[in-house]
Amino acid sequence: MKAEVHPLSGATYTELGDGLVRVEKARKYGVFKWDGHHVEGDLTHADPHLLQWVGGPELPAEANENDPRRLARMQSAAAAEAQYAGGTALAGDELDEAFTRYTGDPGRATPAGPRSSGISFMELLDGDQYPERIPETLRMESSQPGGVRKVPTERYTSKEWHDLEVERLWKRVWQMACHVDDIPEVGDYVVYDVAHLSWIVARTGADEFKAFNNACLHRGRQLREFDGRGATEFRCPFHGWCWEIDGALREIPSEWDFPEVREDAGHLREAQTATWGGFVFINPDPACEPFAEFLGDLPRHYEKYDYEKKYKQMHVAKVVRANWKTNQEAFMEGYHIIATHPQLMIYGGDGANHQYDSFGNWSRAVTIAARSSPHRGIHPSREEIFATRHRMADMMRESLREVVGDRVDAYCDAELIDGQYNNLFPNFHPWGSFSRIVYRFRPYGNDPDMSIMEVIYLAPWPEGEEKPPAAPIHWLGPDDPWTDAPEMGGLARVLNQDSYNLPKVQKGLKTKADPYIYLAAYEEGKLRHFHHLYDQWVAFDRQV
């Protein structure tokens, strides 16, 4: 039976079973269904996020409880959940501290502008056990300039803006299409859809990938509807026009009836392709900038971690009733932790003192493991913080040694216990350091109110062992909780809280009397950076 004290209200939430939760505060009580509906009692409103955490969907029991691969997945998910919370999970009596209520982070003035009252990431680096191992990329600071910004709500709700994105963004920008392990052999291919656009991404050589417009040049019928293996041709199911796997024309049935068509139909229309980090990227624009220029210095921030030498351990995709930007922006900042994930304030941190930086076409946020909570006025001494961090880093170092060997001794404490959630414009989110998480967000069909969120785990495997195969994609519908994907481990329950908000945000954007939202100067700097780039790609001739 679970019970939690809400850090903001001080109310106690106790699981009753059958999806019911009892909430008690100041001699009043209420019983609620986990989805927020009131059942009985004086209290008639409760936090839906903590109701969900205490009484909501759980991970289903699995028959293979002792399967080592499953246990490894669960361990990685637990670490990911802790990093998402802004720190590394603690065990045993370290969690038994006295309950401390929310008081609010008063902030502090710094030479760079207002910041959280909590200890900063740069200050934590100064106490690292191995300063000589700290890469210079970790010490880089580049917060998004400018103050609070207003963003028009129509960007999230309008079909006109959706259509602009298709023409100005999705037809022109570099975008992640798949992982190389999704198409391991020559002739393997995936169907990559974004909005109403569709591409066949195929492996055409040992280290060669091509992306073809998924439409027959005859009458436009989709050439492929599903992913496939070992293709030797792409033949249209409608009339049989056929192309080789490299896109060259093989056959036009009754070609005598199509004089002078062979030259025009001689090759499937092709997008530009490139690879980085084990992923295949495409760009439909033949005049696009080189991929290396688009990436900028992003690869330098990953070069210590053998990103290309990881396998796709898990892949779950969920259809969400919200615009892809609404969806994505919920995962670009830690500001929402205090309200959306109140339980994480107790077990990890409150996200107030994350570090936010923007570089070219990408941005990052750095979580910190410090056992501090600026929103609850918990500020341990530096000696206490460093002692805790050293202990946690040593534990993580020995745990990782079992997988990556003595290479783990090349990493400082911060690389092992602090998280980095990064995003490359427009929709690709590869987390940094040793986190396994990768997110991708994209429009779902031609409806601006629908999107897809994907969660991928990339994991190393023991040296000397054969590389495991890539996990197939597991699809969830808009009414399916993330906990229907048990391979996600503990992160699934955290994402249930996030996804609960999204349809309500989308509805609120449409009903909002003021036709704009606010983005904070610092804590939502990554969102402001995204919209700065979005202006250049989509809104350059629009008043914003």
Image (cartoon, rainbow, N blue to C red):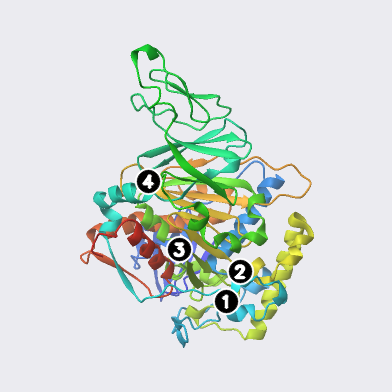
Q: Which residue is mark 1?
A: 121
Quarter occupied by residue 183: top right
Q: Give me the residue at 33% from left, 61% from top.
A: 535
The residue where tag 2 is placed is: 418
Q: Residues within 10 Å of mark 1 (few under 14, many from 20)?
A: many
The residue sitting at 29% across, 59% down in the picture is 539
Compared with 146, 156 (above or below) is above
| Residue 403 rendering spot, x and y as whole percentages | 74, 54
Mark 4 or mark 3, which has the lower sequence index?
4
Residue found at x 53% / y 46%: 274
What kind of residue is marked 3?
Met
In the rendered structure, are the residues bearing label 1 and label 2 in contact, judged by CB atoms less than 8 Å apart? yes
Disc 1 secondary structure class: helix
Q: Secondary structure at mark 2?
A: loop
Q: CA gap, disc 4 to disc 3?
A: 24 Å
**Residue type indicated by callout 2:** Asp
N-terminal of the pair, mark 4 or mark 2, is 4
Residue type pointed to by label 4: Lys
Q: Secondary structure at mark 3?
A: loop
Residue under numbered circle 4: 171
Q: CA distance from mark 4 to mark 1?
A: 38 Å
Which residue does the numbered mark 3 point to in the structure image? 332
- Along the viewing direction, whichever of 354 and 269 lies nearer the viewer: 269
**Contact (Cβ within 8 Å) of mark 3 with mark 2:** no
Kindly check if marks 4 and 3 are in contact, taking CB atoms under 8 A apart as contact.
no
**Which label's residue is closer to the chain start, 3 or 2?**
3
